[in-house]
């Protein structure tokens, strides 16, 4: 195909995309969508696909919400892509066609499946080449609320994601209405440009920086933060300055409504399918009963608000009274929110509450949690402690002698938590000071008992990074340096894994192909199962893992740009294949 | 001292939920807890009879009165690792009776934190390498399914997209008019880099001239930047002066972020004439609002020897102290106004005075900070 060829309107759009793909392959680095060719608009929101054989098609599109508009990657023509609805016990074949001019993939987030269908290029399979259709085939061994997304480059940010719900084999009498609430972001900027801004522009997206006249912190504490070259408002790397927060593909201006009948018990399947945003979820005036976390049932916990980390899912039951209620997904940094109305009167729009004031990080977020002598009478101890800063000043915030020998100390590690403590009881930044009920990991208790087995080995993994250089890693090594050096488990080995966060950001750490049990204080057989755990800033989180899914699996921070900057590693479960199994 | 602190730490700093023993009744089957009575006896023997350890079973430490006479130094808290501190409510503890006055917190730095049980790690569970089976089988399981050729390429893609991505940026830190007494000048200060988080190719260009006249000074630097720590890069390369006369230099310096968020750029230059000079620049952004930023900036130029042809004497050659107030319409586009005092010093000042000029003075600045 020559550069001078006139593309006839009679060509199908797919042919056209293939053609431009060939042009790109011929040396033009500019993608089709950036060359001013008109793309069809992706639908906001999603349809539903189900059955034994499902076709999914990945295309370039245009997307608009509110005043923002730009390129998107849509699956089956919508952002988010279709709700894939399956039934526990069925087999499924998913035919995924990639019409982009670059490789793509789909990872089924939270599903138990043979590793070669997990969808991570370079780990589980080669990826899906442009123009190619890849067939995923696996049995459905579980039920619950999950999602799917691209694991190629930064495509997920551009709209390549969608919800996945597996209905239980047995009817579930706990609810009358079933709604999917998929939280995400849209940005008109190209994801690679966002990655570049994070790498070169200090706090480029942050519009809540501390100002000179801001009275929320004492001068002493400010000096302490300054001395450490840290920013107490370094809460979200990417904010509403470029993001519009979406619920089911609809920004606040789109006036999304969910209708219900008064008295109905509504199951909200809340999925955080965003690239970078933790959300505070609440429906003011309507309590929520959490019934499942990451797809797996937990004992009921009634809360008024919860924070959901990137890639987590929570199922809640609500029984709203007659009227219109705002379903609010407020970004953790409080720069914006996703809003929908839950209404019993068609057409009525609920008034969302205003954004709350941004909060500051604290000493505990710097890994000095172990030094928080809260509740003690310091005066009687004879200490002269005029403020938090005294203790912090005495502490080296990068004492690399505290690190285990397997952590590589390099320029990509700007902090070592001096006294990290377990923060399973922390409800998330800013929710520790609200005056209503919030969810903590320590509230979660598995509804069905897990087999009782004590771990035979313990493993410590440090989450490391450098804010200024925007480098992120496990144990000081970016994935680019350890693609051939995995974290190794023996098949059926049970290991207690402690994640130590040596950074001041919360990291949602996701292990593919497995559920691990949070060591959260629940008795050993009722530790809740999760596929993603938020490790709070400067703190630790511990889980018990039975490595019973042979193969190679991705293990990474689910903040997309952290993964892209290296916070990822392969986990291998060996031997492979298991004798007597395929 | 360390023993005392460890004792205190075990009692005070042991985080809630640090240890998974929330419910002892549910732990009857746990091998490591079965010997709880023996554990208590060992503790009692060491800690003294005043403490009522029978309350440990219920883990109600509010009833666990810490008597002042209790000798914490003698307590062997290493034995506590299997204990249930999860349910200990420290807020209820009466620490006012504890003799913390004797605790020497200056010893924090020497504490062996790795010895402390900070949460979740059970001393009973061994650390160490994975079992031998974990090393069996193929290096990459996917090679068995999809073939090595296809997977090698995909792993290459993984390396390229998960760390060490290369980016580039151009900073126009100062494009400004400098309005002084009797002479109005312009100045540019441009830099840029391309590379990864730790390895970069860096260029810098600075120059100035008089409006209506020619360019007085112009230099270009091409450097390699290598991270020498979390916050600083070593930069080494060449500097070429185009004006006032063509001169080449070797350049070595550091650039990065000093404590208190001060950006520092310091370098020494060795010219092809053998002259050694140095330059130190430091600046700090004070955010008055989210868009209005006051930036104090200081620069020193130094010389190791007299350079008569450039009117420079050994020592501190000149210094600039300025402040720029910029408004970030967007972070990439920020016009500013400012004021700067610049002065020559020592022998250099004498040379200027001998020429009948003033070695120091204020200039007003109007400029643009931009980057892309």
Image (cartoon, rainbow, N blue to C red):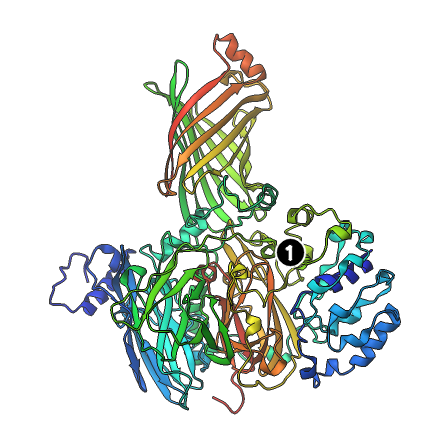
- Above or below A504: residue A527: below
Q: How many marks?
A: 1
User: In the depicted view, which residue is nearer to us: B205 or B51?
Assistant: B51
B227 sits left or right of A252 in the view: right
- Mark 1 crowd level (few <14, some 14–19, many ≥20, 10 Å Cα): many
Q: Report the quarter where the N terminus of chain A lies.
A: bottom left
**Looking at the image, can residue B244 be seen?**
no
Splitting the image into 4 quarters, where does residue A573 fall? bottom right
Give me the residue at 50% from left, 79% from top.
Answer: A300
**Label 1 marks which chain's residue?**
A
User: In the depicted view, which residue is nearer to us: A330 or B281?
Assistant: A330
- Above or below A36: residue A573: below
User: In the depicted view, which residue is nearer to us: B156 or A558?
Assistant: A558
B112 sits left or right of A334 in the view: right
Expressed as whole percent of the image width and height from the top left, the position of residue B129 reads 66, 73
User: Label 1, on which residue?
Assistant: A368
Give me the residue at 81% from left, 64% from top.
Answer: B66
Assign a secondary structure to mark 1.
loop
- Above or below B288: residue A541: below
Splitting the image into 4 quarters, where does residue A525 fall? bottom right
For the view shown, which residue lies furthest in the front direction? A322
Expressed as whole percent of the image width and height from the top left, the position of residue A148 reads 38, 73
Expressed as whole percent of the image width and height from the top left, the position of residue A342 reads 33, 70
């Amino acid at each position: 195909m020559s550069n001078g060829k006139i593309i006839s309107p009679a060509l199908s759009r797919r042919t056209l995309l293939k053609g431009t793909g060939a042009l790109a392959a011929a040396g033009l680095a500019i993608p089709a969508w950036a060359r001013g060719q008109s793309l069809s608009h992706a639908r906001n929101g999603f349809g539903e696909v189900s059955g034994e054989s499902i076709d999914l098609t990945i295309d370039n599109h245009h997307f608009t919400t509110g005043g923002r508009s730009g390129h998107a990657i849509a699956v089956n023509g919508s952002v988010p892509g279709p709700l894939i609805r399956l039934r526990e016990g069925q087999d499924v074949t998913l035919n995924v066609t990639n019409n982009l001019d670059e490789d793509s993939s789909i990872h089924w987030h939270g599903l138990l499946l043979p590793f070669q269908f997990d969808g991570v290029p370079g780990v589980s399979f080669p990826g899906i080449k442009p123009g190619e259709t890849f067939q995923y085939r696996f049995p459905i061994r579980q039920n619950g609320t999950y999602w799917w997304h691209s694991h190629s480059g930064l495509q997920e940010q551009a709209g390549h994601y969608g919800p996945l719900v597996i209905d239980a084999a047995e009817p579930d009498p706990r609810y009358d209405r079933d709604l999917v609430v998929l939280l995400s972001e849209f940005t008109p900027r190209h994801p690679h440009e966002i990655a570049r801004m994070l790498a070169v522009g200090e706090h480029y997206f942050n519009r809540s920086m501390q100002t000179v006249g801001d009275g929320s912190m004492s001068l002493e504490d400010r000096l302490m933060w300054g001395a450490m070259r840290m920013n107490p408002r370094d809460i979200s790397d990417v904010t509403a300055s470029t993001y519009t927060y979406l619920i089911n593909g609809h920004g606040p201006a789109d006036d999304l409504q969910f209708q219900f009948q008064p008295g109905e018990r509504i199951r909200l399947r809340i999925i955080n399918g965003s690239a970078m945003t933790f959300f505070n979820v609440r429906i003011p005036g309507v309590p929520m009963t959490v019934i499942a976390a990451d797809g797996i049932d937990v004992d009921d916990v009634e809360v008024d608000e919860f924070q959901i980390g990137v890639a987590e899912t929570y199922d809640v039951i609500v029984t709203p009274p007659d009227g219109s209620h705002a379903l609010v997904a407020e970004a953790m940094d409080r720069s914006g929110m996703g809003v929908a109305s839950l209404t019993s009167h068609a057409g009525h729009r609920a008034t969302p509450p205003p954004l709350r004031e941004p909060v500051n990080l604290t000493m505990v977020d710097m890994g000095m949690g172990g030094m928080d002598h809260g509740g003690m009478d310091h005066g009687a101890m004879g200490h002269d402690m005029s403020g938090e800063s005294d203790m912090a000043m005495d502490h080296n915030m990068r004492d690399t002698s505290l690190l285990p020998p397997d952590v590589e100390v390099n320029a990509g590690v700007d902090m070592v938590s001096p006294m990290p403590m377990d923060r399973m009881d922390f409800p998330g930044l800013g929710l520790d000071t609200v005056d209503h009920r919030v969810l903590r990991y320590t509230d979660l208790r598995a509804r069905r008992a897990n087999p009782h087995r004590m771990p035979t080995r313990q493993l410590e993994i440090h989450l490391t990074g450098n804010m200024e250089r925007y480098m992120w890693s496990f144990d000081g090594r970016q994935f680019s340096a350890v693609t051939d050096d995995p974290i190794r488990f023996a098949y059926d080995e049970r290991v207690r894994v402690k994640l130590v966060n040596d950074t001041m950001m919360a990291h949602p750490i996701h292990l593919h192909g497995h559920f691990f049990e949070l060591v959260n204080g629940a008795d050993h057989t009722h530790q809740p199962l999760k596929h993603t755990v938020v490790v709070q800033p400067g703190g630790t989180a511990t889980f018990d893992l039975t490595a019973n899914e042979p193969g190679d699996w991705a293990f990474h921070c689910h903040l997309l740009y952290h993964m892209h900057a290296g916070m990822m590693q392969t986990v291998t479960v060996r031997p492979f294949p298991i004798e007597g199994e395929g | 001292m360390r023993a005392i602190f460890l004792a205190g730490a075990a009692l005070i700093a042991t985080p809630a939920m640090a240890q998974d023993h929330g419910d002892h009744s549910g732990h009857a089957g746990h091998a490591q807890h079965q010997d709880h009575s023996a554990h208590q006896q060992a503790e009692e023997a060491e800690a003294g009879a005043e403490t009522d350890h029978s309350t440990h079973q219920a883990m109600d430490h509010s009833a666990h009165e810490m008597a002042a006479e209790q000798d914490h130094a003698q307590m062997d808290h290493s034995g506590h690792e299997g204990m249930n501190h999860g349910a200990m409510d420290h807020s209820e503890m009466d620490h006012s009776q504890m003799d913390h006055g004797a605790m020497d917190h200056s010893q924090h730095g020497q504490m062996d934190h790795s010895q402390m049980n900070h949460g979740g790690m059970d001393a009973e569970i061994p650390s160490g390498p994975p079992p031998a089976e974990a090393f069996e089988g193929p290096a990459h399981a996917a090679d068995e399914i999809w073939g090595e050729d296809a997977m090698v390429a995909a792993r290459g893609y993984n390396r390229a997209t998960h760390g060490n991505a290369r980016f580039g940026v151009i900073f126009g830190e100062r494009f400004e008019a400098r309005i002084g007494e009797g002479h109005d000048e312009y100045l540019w200060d441009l830099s840029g880099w391309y590379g990864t988080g730790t390895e970069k190719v860096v260029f810098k260009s600075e120059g100035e001239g008089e409006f209506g006249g020619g360019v007085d000074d112009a230099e270009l630097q091409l450097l390699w930047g290598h991270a020498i720590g979390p916050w600083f890069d070593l930069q080494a390369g060449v500097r070429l002066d185009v004006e006032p006369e063509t001169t080449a230099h070797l350049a070595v310096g550091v650039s990065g972020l000093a404590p208190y968020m001060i950006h520092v750029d310091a370098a020494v230059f060795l010219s092809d004439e053998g002259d050694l000079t140095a330059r130190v620049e430091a600046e700090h952004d004070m955010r008055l609002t989210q868009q209005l930023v006051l930036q104090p900036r200081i620069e020193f130029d130094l010389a190791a020897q007299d350079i008569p042809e450039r009117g420079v004497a050994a020592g501190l050659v000149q210094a600039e102290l300025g402040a720029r107030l910029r408004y970030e319409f967007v972070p990439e586009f920020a016009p500013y106004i400012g004021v700067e005092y610049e002065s020559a010093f020592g022998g250099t000042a004498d040379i200027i005075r001998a020429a009948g000029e003033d070695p120091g003075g204020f200039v007003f600045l109007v400029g643009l900070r931009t980057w892309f």
